[in-house]
Amino acid sequence: MMTTFNAMPQSLIKGAIIGVLLALLAACSTLRLAYGNGPQLAWWWLDGYLDFAAEQAPRARQAIDGWFAWHRNTQLAGYASLLAQARAQVAEPTTPAAACRWQQQVRDRLEPALERTIDAFAGLVPGLGEAQLRHLEQRFAKNNADLRRDYLQPDAAERSRAAVERVVERAEQLYGRLDETQKKLVADGVAASPFDPEAWLAERVRWQRETLRALRHLVADKAGPDEIVAALRVLAERAERSPDPEYRDYQLRLVDYNCAFAARLHNTTTATQRQAARERLGGWEADLRSLAGAG
């Protein structure tokens, strides 16, 4: 059923899409309001990374508005159907294979949003200046410092506590309060996890450097639309599939472990917790169908 994943490197664009969608789902009581404000939230997020000049802002806002109009009209109903499927299954036991299939379904469902994002925002690349790319580089560095603080605490016990708290919080967003036995299962699962925050952050930095090199190259060479789209697709693909074979093997081990862990945790949930999950999923589904209908 629903799975809880450790952080993995994602592209700037895909990270924004997934981050916004997960934030909306986590706040189910305000999802409709939050999604209605989505264009403004997305503008603040994108401007925070690229610091648009006044003359660039209208085009960026137009791209954001167009993306949300398309997304509301074509994608939300599919997300709602996926949640309906999850709601129908959440009361039953699950397996690691089923958890991995669920993860893949979610990724497949988000893929059109990524493709549309690349197409919509490729037109902004030629107007980027070196000052903006330096701003992006500084934003990457700040975010990395924040992640290092949150994931790589010098004290091992503190690092473990923070990791356990993250997983418990995510699980409780779906199932409601976990009992002490379940929290112990989470703690044991975190301790046994192959998740390596050092490797994860190093891979993240590698991708960011590649992104900055690619953007500088595209701007300096005055690349055409097709070349820009192709380059952005390569970056998105490399964010998902590292060019480093050792890191790819690590990612596969981590995914397999997380699927098994999610299944193990789900199978400990009580009838009350599974009913809470059904109700949460149903609320998210209803909100998404309402938003899609409004579109």
Image (tube, helix red, strand yellow):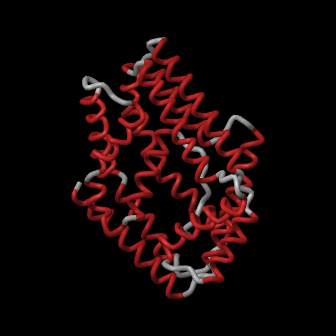
**Towards the viewer: 82 or 262:** 262
Q: Determine the residue located farthest toward the bottom in the rendered image.
A: 271
Q: Determine the residue located farthest toward the left in the rendered image.
A: 294
The residue drawn where x is 45% and y is 28% is 135
Asked if residue 287 is positioned above or below residue 266 in the image, the reply reads above
**Towards the viewer: 93 or 250:** 250
**Towards the viewer: 51 or 155:** 155
The percent coordinates of residue 58 (x first, y second) are 24, 30
The quarter of the image holding the C terminus is bottom left
- Seen in the image, is 245 located left or right of residue 162? right
The residue drawn where x is 30% and y is 35% is 63
The quarter of the image holding the N terminus is bottom right
**Towards the viewer: 221 or 49:** 49
Asked if residue 46 is positioned above or below residue 182 in the image, the reply reads above
Q: Determine the residue located farthest toward the top in the rendered image.
A: 221
Quadrant hosting residue 9: top right
- Seen in the image, is 5 located left or right of residue 125? right
The percent coordinates of residue 166 (x first, y second) are 57, 64
The percent coordinates of residue 156 (x first, y second) are 72, 59
Exactly how many numbered labels are in the figure? 0
Q: Determine the residue located farthest toward the front in the rendered image.
A: 155
The percent coordinates of residue 95 (x first, y second) are 66, 72
Quadrant hosting residue 46: top left
Asked if residue 231 is positioned above or below residue 155 in the image, the reply reads above
The residue drawn where x is 71% and y is 44% is 199
The residue drawn where x is 68% and y is 71% is 187
- Seen in the image, is 47 located left or right of residue 222? left
